[in-house]
Image (spheres, coloured by chain):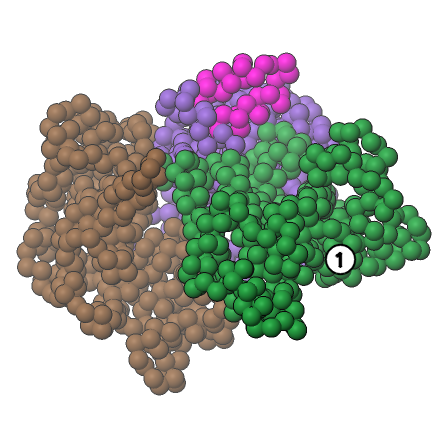
Chain colours: A purple, B green, C brown
Amino acid sequence: MAAEREQMTEQTAQPEPNDDLLLRVRGLKTEFVTRRGTIKAVRDVSLDVHRAEKVGIVGESGCGKSALALSILGLISSPGRVVAGEVWLNGRELASLSDREMQVVRGRNVSLIFQDPMTSLDPVMTIGSQITESILKHQRGISRRAARDRAIELLRDVEVPLAERRIDDFPHQLSGGMRQRVMIAIALANDPDLLIADEPTTALDVTTQAQVIDVLERLVEERNAAVILITHNLGVVAEFCDTVKVMYAGRIVEEATTDVLFRAPTHPYTEALLHSVPDPKRLARGPLPTIPGAPPSLADLPPGCSFEPRCPLGQGVEVCLEQAPFPIEVGSPGSIVVSECHFAQDRWAEAHNPTEGVQSHE
Amino acid sequence: MVRVIVNKVTSSIATIFGASVVAFVLLRVLPGDPARLIAGSLASDEAIAGVRRQLGLDQPLHVQYIRYITDFFTGDWGFSFSSGVPVKEILGSRFPATAELALYAFLFAFLSALVLALLATYREWPVVDGVVRALSSFGLGTPPFWFAILALIVFFEQFGLLPGPSGRLSSATTPPPLLTGFYTIDALVAGQFDILGEAIKHLILPVVSLGLVPFAFLVRLLRANLLEISSEPFIVVVRSKGIGRWLTHVRHALPNAFLPTLTASGLILAELLTGSVLVERIFTWPGVGALVVDSIKRQDFAVVQTFILLSASLYILVNLVVDILYGVIDPRTRIPTTEAR
Amino acid sequence: MSESQSASSVLSGLRGDPSEALLWVNGLSKEFQLKRPGVWRQELQILRAVDGVSFDIRRGETFGLVGESGCGKSTAARCILRLLQPTAGAVHFDGMDLGTLGLEEMRRFRRRMQIVFQDPYASLDPRMTVLQIVEEPLLVHGVQDRAARLEKAQEMLSLVGITPDQADRKPHAFSGGQRQRIGIARALILNPELVVLDEPVSALDVSIQAQVLNLLGSIQERLDLTYLFIVHDLILAEYFCDRLAVLYLGAVMEMADRETLFQEPLHPYTVTLLSAVPIPDPSSQGRRNRIILEGEVDALSVQAGGCRFRSRCPVGKDRDVCRVEEPPLVEQAPGHWVSCHFPGELRPGGES
């Protein structure tokens, strides 16, 4: 069964021509062994990221999205372990590399931006040294002077005012928005091909968030870098990302381009998620549609579809209870959705050719 | 920063005064009469009164106190009641022995704690971690004097590997020419390498005995802090830059984890410097600890008062240095957060 | 979230009779003294977290205090509840000036106004069972009969969806959303009239937010509650509140009912704030029309005189009157109050 599913994953996720493909993840599995049991944080995840593509990974807490990011970078530490899978970056397989070998990749080809800017910087080092640390590590032969100049330049790129002075400041002297920009500067110091941003704006005010996203987008486009943006904020995803992957209980349950996903989600979880955010244009006032229950414990997953207990469509349905769904490709060329739902095909059909008496999912 | 130092110095001086009052009162509250002890049990009342006058103990209390304070700060520490030798000389002759022992014990405890805590927390090595934790528990639960005696039995008596409780050098050896009072340094400077070797050998057991408890305490503290810091988000961020594990651990985790250890280290050093009676006795170490205990028994106010004030000053000095070092290591204490969040 | 109070919300009522409103706040200020190390002395710097805030809340309505971090909304709420002592200003609850009350009288008033806190993980005592947590307010306010307390506590817990068999467990056994509901039960057990909701759903996942908000909505009419809703998420604010006040650096920039504020914002800050909100709709034009502010909120930068938003304001940055004179809070239209010299000049879309 698992083997079949893997085969299906291989077949259904055919990307465009390979030289455009930057990152290819296949069958990634990450587990954490704790007293409460084995937590399967990432369960057989496969995804592709193309050059300069902006991919959004959406999900709520506990769905495994942060674990996914760390797994790609090989930064999962005990009691966690990547137990299976391949990660291909620019044609080079990463999961089998030693930590030493991965050190050359991290900060150079792939960089990470973390969620909470208040705890993401070393409190006892100046922000300048934290930027130059990355530069000195990866740019062999560069002088300290040159590295420092480059750091100042980076601070200017991320719009930190008075960069030449602030470079010697300590993190606690900067506000949250500023610190996040320093994080971006660190991440972009060596012109990476791929930037993974894990909830980069969640801890920020909305106006600061707008500033940071603005800066990020400009720099990413200037440098032609790809981005994996992990967030639960659907608004940010809608505005920033080209394609979206929805994660639930350790798996990617739906993926499509942003337009298609927001317009016609096929997976019930995606739909419920989209509906639970109040949208002034969409809703009359009244109770918000909610998803009953709570996400399943990743240590104790049901045998069938992991969303079944909360699914308005599949709850109690035999096939959903017994069989975990395969990823299925639905839709027409130009608007392809890959979805893990037994009813994906039907829902797509209904959305695009509404039968009488049935509302289309708009 | 300057303001911080000024503040600390001011409060330190206040503390010293407080200590002096306590010392003064306590000594005079003790039962017994030093004048009588010195004059002897058979002495006449006149003789005792005479001694009392000589010692200045017939003056009203507040006069005695003022004399005590002014004399201390002018360096006139008087004469020992029992031996008549100037207090300065007595303390001065015994202090270097204690200081040498204390400093090496401190270095031993501190460096071992540093290295072992780093190793225990670097990777998931349950064996290493287990050993370190066992050592720590052992150290914390073991009285230094018990360990000292045990060590002597094993290393001196049984295996003859190390010298016995004969003090800093064997009785036949003359000490090196006096420079600092530290036999190790003086011997090194004078080029007397055989004496240096002997001094070191005599130091090994007392240093380990004395340093065992501080080591256990420090390694436990540092290990706990390192573990806590290692799970902070910024450590992952450092790793995501491609920095290796050991470098991340030493360059980023250690400075952050180190700070609470600094305070503890200061206290430990100060305590060690004020002498350890039991260990000094066991190894016949000519230090200050034994001297002070004897002086208390003999109600030798002069020695004890001075010693108390000196110890208090030492503690305060060490703490002052620790505070300043805090400012050096942790920028958050010296540069206030200027921007509101 | 009550139905059409639109007729009565159009009536101003702000500077009207304090006894008409359930909560009437006038000129509320709270100063904090910060010690800044100087060279030889400690310099004192005054931080005005709340600087002359005035608004009123009518019975049964949901009033929103909206703003970003550092705007003073949480501090204001705590001053209203007397969890902090205000430095200046008056707070009238049901016609009664709270500043004139002694400790014991204040205590009795506290029954009528309760608060639900933001952090569901920090606001429940981890050593008490959930039942004990919810019954505690009754105990504090002198209900001696244990059986009566427990019964009431169970009732409250059921109301928020916690079953009796769960009531003997400790907080750590519950999820964030459940804990927040326990906090709500605790706030409601004394039958308060006013409930302050301090960012009640910010720490929760999106789908759980909806559950908790629905709960709050459904019990409001049933229990005859008035809500003061403190929030930074504008989408939620728009969804949940009848009337809102937008705060910036401790003062009210704009205040109006829901439709007016979101459809016709007059203050440049409000306009910017609204434009900054990312819309979960790829086809929206919001992105193109976004106004990006320069600089940051700096609570210590409030200048004496002049508008506190001036340094970042696209409209007033270079204008003398904005630099010199702090704009008063003026009723531009019935029920619509704005503190700006050039209200309405900045339009959504960035055109001025």
Q: What residue appears at the point 54 percent right and 14 percent down from the top-left corner? A: A146
Within 10 angstroms of label 1, few (less than 14), some, or many (20 or more) residues? some
Task: Let me know if residue C348 is in the magenta part.
Answer: no
Q: What residue appears at the point 59 percent right and 43 percent down from the top-left corner? A: B258
Q: What residue appears at the point 64 percent right and 59 percent down from the top-left corner? A: B82
The image shows residue A320 at horizontal and vertical percentages of 58, 55
Tell me: C83 left or right of C175.
left
Say which of B90 and C310 sits in front.
B90
The image shows residue A257 at horizontal and vertical percentages of 48, 32
Tell me: C280 left or right of C314.
right
Residue C80 versus residue C157 in the image, above or below: above
Q: Which residues are magenta?
A: A127-155
- Please, what is the three-letter code of the amino acid marked with disc 1? Arg
Say what secondary structure mark 1 lies in: helix
The image shows residue B97 at horizontal and vertical percentages of 71, 46
Residue C169 at least partly seen = yes
The residue that mark 1 highlights is B281
Residue C237 versus residue A150 in the image, above or below: below
Q: Quadrant of the C terminus of chain A?
A: top left
Task: Let me know if residue A139 is in the magenta part.
Answer: yes
Q: What residue appears at the point 41 percent right and 61 percent down from the top-left corner? A: B62
Q: Main secondary structure of the magenta part?
A: helix
The answer for which chain carries disc 1 is B
The image shows residue B214 at horizontal and vertical percentages of 67, 52
Residue C68 versus residue A160 in the image, above or below: below
Tell me: C284 left or right of B105.
left
